[in-house]
């Protein structure tokens, strides 16, 4: 790998990690979801710092081209992110449904109590 390219990859990976840490610090990202992003950032740093790792993995996994291995890993990472986000959305949707049902029950109770507490009118 050409040295300027390796330097740019290292700088890009470091910037990627810096953004993740900044988002963690400003609480725009929770630790639970940041772990996968941090793992990917560290993998990028390793691949950029020691490109030989990609070639070793390529040989271990019997992949013809190193770029194919990197693309397969990126696709796997994206699938992992999509799966974790789908699980989070499902959990939130269930919590919202339960919360909506609870609010509806409480509103009905309030309406009944307000109806019982109003004095009857004495109209003749």
Image (tube, rainbow, N blue to C red):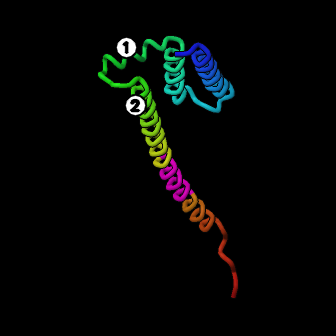
The residue under the point 59% across, 19% down is 5
Q: Is residue 96 magenta?
A: yes
The residue identified by callout 2 is: 72
- Relative image position of residue 49 (x, y in whole percent): 53, 12
Question: Which numbered disc covers residue 56?
Answer: 1
Q: Is residue 52 magenta?
A: no
Q: Is residue 72 left or right of residue 113?
A: left
Q: Over which residues does the magenta segment extend?
A: 95-106
- Relative image position of residue 9 (x, y in whole percent): 58, 20
Q: Is residue 64 left or right of residue 54?
A: left
Q: Quadrant of the C terminus?
A: bottom right
Secondary element under disc 1, as helix, strand or loop, is helix
Question: Which numbered disc covers residue 77?
Answer: none
The residue under the point 40% across, 31% down is 72
Q: CA distance from mark 2 to mark 1?
A: 15 Å
- Relative image position of residue 8 (x, y in whole percent): 62, 20
The residue under the point 45% across, 43% down is 86
Tag 1 or tag 2, which sits nearer the N-term? 1
Q: How many marks?
A: 2
User: Looking at the image, is 5 positioned above or below residue 107?
Assistant: above
| Residue placed most toward the observer, 108 or 59 | 59
| Within-10-Å neighbours for mark 1: few <14, some 14–19, many 20+ | few
The residue under the point 59% across, 62% down is 113
The quarter of the displayed image where residue 13 is located: top right
């Amino acid at each position: 790998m050409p040295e300027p390219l390796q330097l740019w990859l290292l700088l890009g990976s470091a910037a990627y990690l810096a953004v993740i840490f900044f988002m963690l610090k400003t609480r725009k990202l929770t630790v639970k979801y940041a772990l996968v992003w941090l793992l990917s950032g560290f993998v990028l740093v390793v691949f950029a710092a020691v490109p030989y790792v990609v070639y070793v993995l390529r040989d271990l996994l019997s992949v013809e081209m190193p770029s194919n291995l990197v693309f397969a890993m990126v696709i796997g990472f994206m699938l992992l992110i999509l799966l974790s986000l789908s699980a989070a959305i499902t959990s939130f949707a269930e919590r919202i449904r339960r919360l909506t049902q609870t609010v509806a029950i409480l509103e009905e109770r309030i309406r009944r109590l307000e109806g019982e507490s109003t004095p009857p009118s004495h109209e003749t």
